[in-house]
Image (spheres, rainbow, N blue to C red):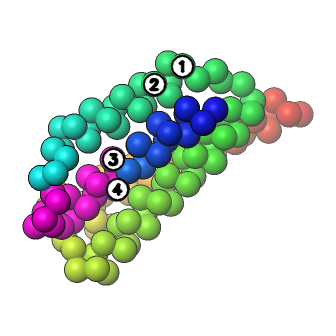
């Protein structure tokens, strides 16, 4: 189980670095890890999670928790980085319609997974 936690940690770290690179491109360590490597890490962590993880009722509950935490974490970054003086070079902001669509998709997916768990428990 700790093996999955390390992949989750790599995923969170890679997402965070991508956001840092986007909001603060002039940061001295911005070229330390290329963006392509971060994207490969993210895709690899997601692929590993989908391929090697069993899905039963307890895993679905953990997936719901993970998705809620990840969504809130990304939203927190989108609040924090502009407050620190950053500006997204790719246009990610709360004024972006695409961001709201992705948030709505995430909320809908969380809700439908939650309903599935509740039906399985009943």
State how far apart marks 3 and 1 are (Cα): 20 Å
Kind of element beneath mark 2: helix
Is residue 112 visible in the rendered image? The answer is no
Q: Is residue 60 left or right of residue 90?
A: right
State how far apart marks 1 and 2 are (Cα): 6 Å
Dot 2 crowding, Cα within 10 Å, few <14, some 14–19, many 20+: few
Task: Kindly indicate whether the residue at mark 2 contacts the one at mark 1 (C-beta within 8 angstroms).
Answer: yes
State how far apart marks 1 and 4 are (Cα): 24 Å
Q: Position of residue 37 (x, y in %)?
A: 22, 37
Q: Which residues lie in the magenta part?
A: 14-30
Dot 3 crowding, Cα within 10 Å, few <14, some 14–19, many 20+: many
Task: Kindly indicate whether the residue at mark 4 contacts the one at mark 1 (C-beta within 8 angstroms).
Answer: no
Task: Kindly indicate whether the residue at mark 3 contacts the one at mark 4 (C-beta within 8 angstroms).
Answer: yes
Q: Which mark is residue 52?
A: 1
Residue nearest the observer in this picture, 54 or 121: 54
Disc on the earlier residue, 1 or 4: 4
Q: Is residue 32 left or right of residue 66?
A: left
Dot 1 crowding, Cα within 10 Å, few <14, some 14–19, many 20+: few
Residue nearest the observer in this picture, 77 or 122: 77
Q: Which residue is mark 2?
A: 48
Check if residue 91 falls in the magenta segment: no
On the image, which quarter does residue 115 sit in?
top right
Per the picture, the main secondary structure of the magenta-coloured stretch is: helix
Q: Which residue is mark 4?
A: 16
């Amino acid at each position: 189980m700790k093996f999955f936690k390390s992949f989750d940690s790599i995923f969170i770290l890679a997402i965070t670095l991508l956001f840092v690179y986007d909001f603060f491109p002039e940061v001295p360590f911005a070229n330390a890890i290329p963006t392509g490597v971060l994207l490969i890490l993210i895709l690899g962590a997601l692929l590993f999670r989908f391929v090697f993880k069993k899905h039963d009722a307890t895993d679905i509950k953990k997936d719901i928790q993970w998705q809620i935490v990840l969504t809130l974490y990304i939203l927190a970054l989108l609040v924090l980085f502009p407050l620190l003086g950053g500006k997204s070079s790719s246009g990610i902001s709360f004024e972006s319609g695409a961001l709201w669509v992705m948030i709505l998709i995430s909320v809908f997916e969380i809700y439908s997974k939650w309903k599935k768990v509740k039906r399985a428990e009943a």
